[in-house]
């Protein structure tokens, strides 16, 4: 398997991993001292909200690494399509929690998912502009 295929697989693996982490009934909300993540703060920001944003930032790195290796994500409008998947995942993964009885939907979690996705999308847009890649019409 060449590096381009590895990067493409990495994108889908990370997306599916986030799906599982957001929907499966696993309890990652407790630290080693038994304190919930929602009670812990980093720079006056709840740690669980910060983690929601951080989980979507790897998509920017995957995009940049893929472009450096010459990955063609889609035939047309690749930045738009890649960004759309990331943005829809940020919203959709939290909405899926409404359909489960074992997870709790939270608007603020969704907002922080979107913040992380938008940060990745900004990196994708800037890299597209800086490399001179224009969206196809």
Image (cartoon, grey):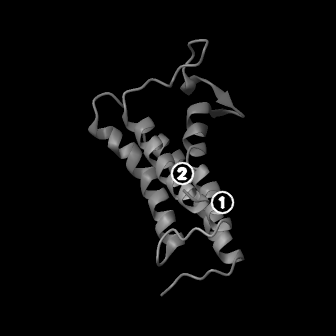
Say which quarter of the image contains residue 119.
Answer: bottom right
- Which residue in the structure is indicated by mark 2? 10
In the foreground, 115 or 56 = 56
The residue shown at (52%, 58%) is 8
Secondary structure of the residue carrying numbered label 1: helix
Residue 132: percent from left, percent from top? 68, 81
The residue shown at (54%, 81%) is 135
- Which residue in the structure is indicated by mark 1? 65
Position of 77 relative to 88 (above/below): below
| Label 2 crowd (10 A; few <14 / some 14-19 / many >=20) | some
Residue 86: percent from left, percent from top? 49, 57
Asked whether the viewer can see residue 105, the reply is no
Asked whether the viewer can see residue 62, the reply is yes
- From mark 1 to mark 2, how far is it between C-alphas? 11 Å
Residue 94: percent from left, percent from top? 40, 43
Q: Are marks 1 and 2 in contact (CB under 8 Å)?
A: no
The residue shown at (58%, 50%) is 116
Residue 95: percent from left, percent from top? 35, 45
């Amino acid at each position: 398997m060449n590096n381009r295929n590895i990067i493409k697989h990495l994108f889908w693996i990370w997306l599916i991993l986030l799906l599982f982490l957001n929907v499966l009934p696993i309890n990652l909300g407790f630290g080693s001292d038994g304190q919930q993540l929602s009670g812990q703060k980093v720079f006056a920001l709840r740690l669980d909200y910060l983690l929601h944003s951080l989980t979507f930032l790897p998509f920017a790195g995957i995009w940049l690494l893929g472009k450096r290796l010459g990955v063609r994500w889609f035939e047309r409008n690749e930045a738009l399509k890649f960004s759309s998947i990331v943005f829809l995942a940020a919203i959709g993964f939290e909405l899926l929690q409404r359909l489960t009885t074992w997870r709790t939907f939270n608007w603020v979690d969704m907002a922080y998912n979107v913040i992380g996705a938008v940060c990745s999308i900004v990196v994708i847009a800037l890299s597209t502009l800086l490399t001179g890649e224009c969206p196809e019409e």
